[in-house]
Image (cartoon, rainbow, N blue to C red):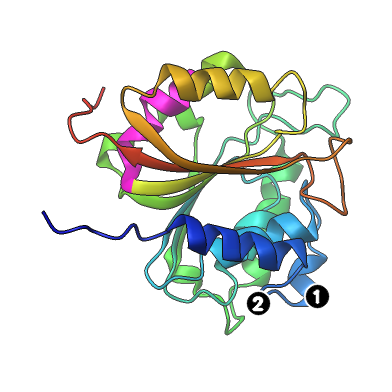
Amino acid sequence: GVMIMPKLSEEYVKACLKMSDAERSKLTDSERELHGQSSIKLKSLLNNLCAKDGTRYLELGVYKASTLMSAVYGNKNIEAVGVEDFTFDYREPKKYMEEGWPNMRSHMYDTLQKYQFVDDVNSENIKIIESNFADVSWSSQQKFDVIFFDLEPVTADIYDTFFKKVFNAFSRQCVVIFSMYSHEEVAPVLEQKVEQYSDRLVTEFKHQRISSGSADAFGYYSGVAIYGFRKKAFAKND
């Protein structure tokens, strides 16, 4: 058969990383300074990975939208979907609120509003789903090429839900960025889950950037594992 080149080859991802290691991307100071649980390198990486025309980007855990806006900035033909239920804010003493933190929600929409008339952002191509990601009907969503998994707190169950359900919205070949990879209690759980679901997903490549801290402003914040996945042709959707 004809070899179909992956849309996002390992070479492409490595080139994106090389640029973001040097904090290079299309981002301006405004995006670099957007407040959130991220860093300039992380924002640059997402911006670079989403630079190909027609990229479909999914972000799980939008928080204040600093990474979402960084992914779309200057990437005019991107289609982006962010999923957020506003229930978890690490800066609140209680952290968790079942009905969602109203100020977190308004902060996120303020950020989106701020970019509504910025030439380098096509706001019509950004969709927010206000929901727990487990409740989204993933098989009826479009297929995503670049996925940023930025959920907190993260557990084995949450990874299971991701690999069982969100899997249905993965492109045949996709790049998934997992945050929190610097956490010693998180990384092995993720690796075990990637292994567990290898019957449906082949890991074509993996890169990582980790720091000694879990909120490294000069690195990739909480650390990232970047996987190039390919869906097995016969993999059954759940």
Amino acid under disc 1? Asp
| Magenta part of the chain | 160-172
3D distance between C-alphas at marks 1 and 2: 10 Å
Q: Circle 1 is placed at which residue position?
A: 29
Residue under the image location 57 percent in, 15 percent down: 156
- Secondary structure beneath dot 2 equals loop
46 or 152: nearer the viewer: 46
Image-based side of 12 in relation to 14, left or right: left
Q: Which mark is residue 26?
A: 2
Compared to 94, does 125 lie above or below? below
Residue under the image location 48 percent in, 32 percent down: 133
Image-based side of 101 in relation to 69, left or right: right
Q: Does the magenta stretch include residue 46?
A: no
Name the main secondary structure of what is drawn in magenta.
Answer: helix
* Residue 167 showing in the rendered view: yes
Residue 36, image x and y in percent?
A: 78, 50
